[in-house]
Image (cartoon, helix red, strand yellow):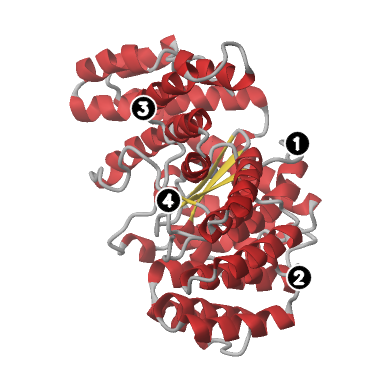
Amino acid sequence: MLSRPRSIFGESTSLGRTARGFATLLLAAAVALSGSVSAFAQNVPVVRDAEIEALVRDYARPIFKAAGLANDGIDIVLVNDQSFNAFVTGRRLFINTGALVTAETPNEIIGVIAHEAGHIAGGHQQKLRDQLDRAKTMAIIATLLGAGAIVAGATTNSKGLAGAGMGVAAGGGEMAQRSILAYQRTEEITADRSAITYLNATGQSGMGMLKTFARFQSALSLSGTQVDPYRISHPMPQERIANLEVLVKQSPFVNAIDPPALQQRHDMMRVKIAAYMQGQAAVARLMRKNPTSLASRYGDAQQTYLYGNPTAALTKTAALIKEQPKNPYFQELRGDILMKINKPQDAADAYAKAASLDPARSGLLLVSLGQALMAVGTPDSLKKAVVQLNNGVGRDKENAEAYRFLAQAYGEEGDIPAADLATAEGHYYAGDYKNAKIFAMRAQQKLKRGEPRWVRAQDIINYTPSNKPK
Ligand SMILES: [Zn+2]
């Protein structure tokens, strides 16, 4: 059984094809200014956590609605990176844990989301932006490596590359870059204005956005060892900040503050990221301001669990549950601690409670429940584990890690074709298509031709980058 912390940041997994595509764009921008490629390797390091995903989704939902984007079903992708970055693409919001832990209020993050939503509102703009992103990528890499090499790469890697983009790449192009940057300036101003519209529509202040952008604008943010990707992709000239400040202060909601309950969830998120990713000193720094707050006591319980005595952590978590009996994530923490001290049945009860309390219906809690049931180890609990793990991946289809547990559970039950298919799914969503196909073929050998699982295996076998099955 697993004894390490699992609810957050324990696993670092890749979103596969989609995430890698975005990583490429970021890579190009990072290379241009810092000359460093190490910050963005092939994969975006994604972390999963039910509590943080639900909170960020709650931040984004009203803004997306005001922007006329998705009504629901926004995928939150948490990127395990201490620098500041956030970007929206389609229904996916990518946000660095570094941005979340830096922001002192929900409003600072909501402002950034509003600005990003401004970039993607309007389908034709999105298309143009895609073109420009490609062109920019091409132009920047062309400048660094010489145009020939990159054009050769582009013809094989980027089928959708438009004629215009190709022209930019072939020309190398200081001129092309200049026109793109001019376009980008206009875009930024437009996105700022849209952001204010969405914030006004939802009765929220633009002060958080202004504070974040002003921080990037200041000389201070240049002196760090790490360059924030957001700063690179969002030029913040003085006049832009000044214009934004005027807009923010004209708003009737300039003095609106976040509801206290939302601020409390934000504080709990920050302390959680600090506990799991930054260590005890960072937790202590956040707790110093208000050592007896619920967030501080949550941080204390978490670090007691991570670095100290699980039994003491259990007592501290029980006190938290007493104060907020309906908080699913306190139950989740209780489950994590019980797993660590080898009480899987009690852990399963805690995770089941967490799942029943979770308004966001996160698949992650069900996967934890499934793992605890597997650890109980009776035939009956194994059967229940398979059900919960299937429910978990049903809600959270791209959770590659969950398929591996599901495969293990099927294997223990002796259902080998189902285990092979789950293994295939796991590889598939991890972006390892070669092994996905190998296991899909193995599954098919033991399945009846044409039955649903056989068909699903065939989808995986047939996969090519242009016809990714759903
Ligand atoms: Zn922008």
* Rendered image: mark on residue 68: 1
Question: Which label sits in the foreground, 3 or 4?
Answer: 3
Q: In this view, does 302 lie above or below 74?
A: below
- Asked if labels 1 and 2 touch by Cβ distance under 8 angstroms, the answer is no
Which residue matches tag 2?
326
* Rendered image: mark on residue 435: 3
- Asked if labels 2 and 3 touch by Cβ distance under 8 angstroms, the answer is no
Query: Label 1 sits on what residue type?
Result: Gly
Mark sitting earlier along the chain (1/4): 1
Give x and y (percent) for residue 196. 70, 50
Name which residue lies at 42% across and 53% down. Answer: 11
Quarter of the image where the N terminus is located: bottom left
Query: Label 2 sits on what residue type?
Result: Lys
* Rendered image: mark on residue 231: 4
Callout 3 secondary element: helix
- Cα–Cα span, label 2 and label 1: 32 Å
Query: Label 3 sits on what residue type?
Result: Asn
Question: Which label sits in the foreground, 3 or 2?
Answer: 3
- The quarter of the displayed image where residue 387 is located: top right
Q: In this view, does 304 lie above or below 256?
A: below
Callout 2 secondary element: loop
Give x and y (percent) for residue 218. 42, 63
- Cα–Cα span, label 4 and label 2: 39 Å
* Rendered image: mark on residue 225: none
Mark sitting earlier along the chain (4/2): 4
Question: Which label sits in the foreground, 4 or 2?
Answer: 2
